[in-house]
Image: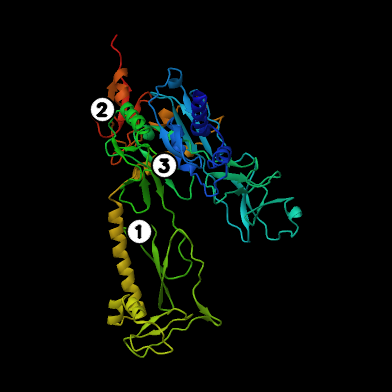
Amino acid sequence: MASLIKYGVFFVLFTNGVLGRFLPEEIFQNTSNRSSNGERQEDCNCEWRFYQHYEAKGCQIVQTDSCGCPTNYLCSSVKQSVSQSEVCMYQSVAYKVGEKIKLADNCQVCRCVDGITPQVVCRQRECPQLDPVEGENCHLVYEENKCCPSRYECIEDVPENASEASAFTCIYNNITYPFGAKIYPPDDPCLVCECKEDWNGLNNSSCYQQECVFEKKKHLLEAGCIPIYHERRCCPIEYYCPEDLHYNNMELRELEGENSTENGGRCIFGGNSYEIGTELSLNDSCVKCICQVPPDFTCVHQSCSLPPSAENCVEIRSADQCCPTYDCLLADVTVTETSATEEDDSEPSTTEEGVCPTPLCADDSCQIEIPPGHECPTCVCGELQTEENPETEEYFIQFQSHDTEDVENHLAPNELRQKRSENMQTDEIQTQQSQQQWNILQEDEDEMETGETIERERELSEESNEGFDEIKAFGSKGPNTPPVVTVELEDTDFDNVIWTSIVPGCPTPLCADSSCRIGVPQGHRCPTCICKKARQP
């Protein structure tokens, strides 16, 4: 009996933890977001998008919480078979060299191309920009199975009858969409829905999950880099890599495997292990990297709201804050707004006639402010309290501390505005210097995007890419490109090469020989062209 119970518990853990990753997200959450007494946890919210890269690394869930959310992954060192090393693997499907990878996104085209080892190469199709139209509730309309929108369509008059409206539109979140429009639910950045005739909400068959295709960045994941996600986006926006990329990948996998089961797991980065809850210092106020679901740190970039629509606003940035604040001058009155994640619904105060008049203070010790309970600015003076001026002493201390130097110098409005602009420029220079202290492969990503832009001009389609050599195209050498040192290695030395063309502070080489591949050989810091050493007859 005891053995039956033991095997039963093992089966439940195995099904919930390991097999759950192969189920669709909504099914897995519906079956696992329940407590031990069978009641569903209403506050459960598994951020699965932050753990997508684990699947590309071949990791498996080993522990979950009461909601069924993963708390620990096991990334064991599993060697590929000879057959797998000759194909590209994507979502457990093998693709031969030259085959097009099947994706739900029509705007992203991926293929398996040949190299030292087969790799996934993707291109993003660019769409021509359509002229904006005048009107309310206008949306881009897409033709079926097309990447680019064909036109704008505005829905100004919506029928009051819901059944009549649904005959030619889709309604979601109190917004009406025309047929052919795309719907992006704010609660799930990875979900994309298409307004079609069979629309019945987010459970519609026309909805699909965005695919990040981590396999195209697999060399970074294997080198120990961690993806940086964004609060309002599905796929990573950057990758953060350790300073030293030269360590054995097999040893890294073994270290991850050891720490995945001991003490609930530890995070691994740069060859070091960290306890759960540890924050990785990136010297960037917008990115938080915390050890939450080992063995990788969970890095998320904070989002900021749009700047205020008011005129004469100056952006103020601080090195220790991600989102800027805005200093807006309205009728010579300073209003400071903070650009945070949550938007402020309050609007500038106005009278029934329009904008508040600008007061003229008789006493130079007074300052123009908008006291609590007032709608328009008035003269706030540090004198004795009166019934018309009921503020406390702490109120004057608080407001007199703002712009003290400007008040003492009695600057005119235009002089005050000019001085503040100079201060803002100084702050921006200091902020730029502080932000340059860390680099998360941004410059290298820009170089890659520049190269990809050239490739995008040649539309990657089924007809035009027959016999196309992707590696040769990447290695095309421009007339002004300096010669690249080529390294010839034996087959046995390829295991010690980091196959990446992206290293912070290093240029990306261009190989003249299409049979060569870009990588960082042992003893080198920057990537170079690596070719197979010719065998002696």
Local packing at callout 3 (Cα closer than 10 Å; few below 14, some 14-19, many 20+) is: few
**Where does the image place residue 260, in percent across and percent down from the top left?**
37, 33
410 in relation to 290, above or below = below
Classify the position of the C terminus by image quarter: top left
Residue type at the position of mark 1: Gln
Tell me if mark 2 has few (under 14), some (14-19) or many (20+) residues whose alpha carbon lies within 10 angstroms of its own. some
SS at circle 2: loop
Q: Residue beneath label 3, please?
A: 449
User: How much space separates mark 2 and mark 1, taking CA atoms?
Assistant: 40 Å
Q: Residue type at mark 2?
A: Gln
Q: Residue 334: x percent and y percent?
A: 40, 75
Mark 1 or mark 3, earlier in chain: 1
Q: In this figure, which residue is indicated by the disc labeled 1? A: 321
The residues bearing labels 2 and 3 have C-alpha atoms spaced at a distance of: 27 Å
Residue 202, image x, y percentages: 62, 46
Q: On the image, which quarter does residue 53 sit in?
A: top left
